[in-house]
Image: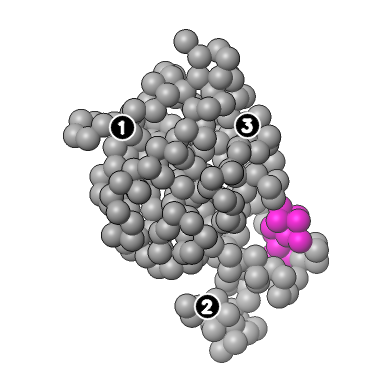
Amino acid sequence: VVNILKTQLEIHPESNVSFYFQNYLDRFFPSLNKEGDRTLEEKIKEMQKFFHLTVTGKFNSETEEMMDQPRCGIPDVLDYSTFPGNPRWRKNLLTYRILNYTPDLPRFMVEEAIEKAFKVWSDVTPLKFQKVARREADILIRFAHGAPFDGRGGILAHAFAPGSGLGGDAHFDEGEKWSQDHIGTNLFLVAAHEFGHSLGLGHSNVQGALMYPIYRYWDPDTFSLPADDRQGIQKLYGNFSVRC
């Protein structure tokens, strides 16, 4: 896979460093722009702090490497957090529908991965999830090509906060090689992360959290929801013991 960022920087290093950093910051740290005219150095420091990098305010190999990591397409925020306004579903039974399937996996494996990803959240909250085949659903799941996706690597998926219209929907980049193990991109792990967004969670800067924006592999058979994520989702919905 060609690293477009690196290639462009090598061709025009002085003119492109600022552009590509600004583009990344505008996409994944939009809240930084609310404070008025901040220097690029200040914005880079914020990004480096979020990812627990050495805070220099300068473009360096460590920062570039982080920018190149496969990740979620949703903007980043500090700590475990919820979306602005704390959006949440006002019911405990949520329906979902898989609109299409990736050819990378058999249909039943896709369904198993999605079901298991929802179970990550239902195991620690009063929420229940029901798959529907034809009728309208709260959460629509789709594999898609094209913008804002970028082919293999880069942006893996994105999801929308609870609400009407696109609210709760999750979209996965068909350009990825989806898998059920460590080869390619594990569908269960990415889906579990995206469904956290579908339920109202934003990103966490805790490196061991499921809602950390950068993709990492865990063994799906032994995966357990980290405490940071559990705290965030239970802030919105309560814990399993209050299920009706």
Q: Residue furthest bottom?
A: 11
Residue drawn at (53%, 27%), measured in percent from left and top?
123
Residue wearing tag 1:
131
> What is the spatial separation of the Cα atoms under label 1 and label 2, in whole angstroms?
38 Å
> What is the spatial separation of the Cα atoms under label 3 and label 2, in whole angstroms?
35 Å
> What is the spatial separation of the Cα atoms under label 1 and label 3, in whole angstroms?
23 Å
- Residue at disc 1, secondary structure: strand
Query: Which comes before the other along the chain, label 3 or label 2?
Result: 2
Tell me the kind of residue under disc 2. Asn
Tell me the kind of residue under disc 3. Arg
Residue drawn at (77%, 66%), measured in percent from left and top?
57
Taking 127 as reference, is 24 above or below it?
below
Q: Which mark is residue 79?
A: none
Tell me the kind of residue under disc 1. Lys
Residue drawn at (71%, 62%), measured in percent from left and top?
44
Q: Is residue 216 visible?
A: yes
Disc nearest the viewer among 3 and 2: 3
Residue 79, image quadrant: top right
Taking 66 as reference, is 218 above or below it?
above
Q: Residue furthest top?
A: 244
Q: Position of residue 152 (x, y in %)?
A: 43, 68
Residue wearing tag 3:
230
Task: Let me know if residue 221 is in the magenta part.
Answer: no
Image: magenta residue range: 40-53
- Residue at disc 2, secondary structure: loop
Disc nearest the viewer among 1 and 2: 1
- Residue at disc 3, secondary structure: helix
Q: Which mark is residue 3?
A: 2
Q: Position of residue 170 (x, y in %)?
A: 39, 44
Query: Which comes before the other along the chain, label 1 or label 2?
Result: 2
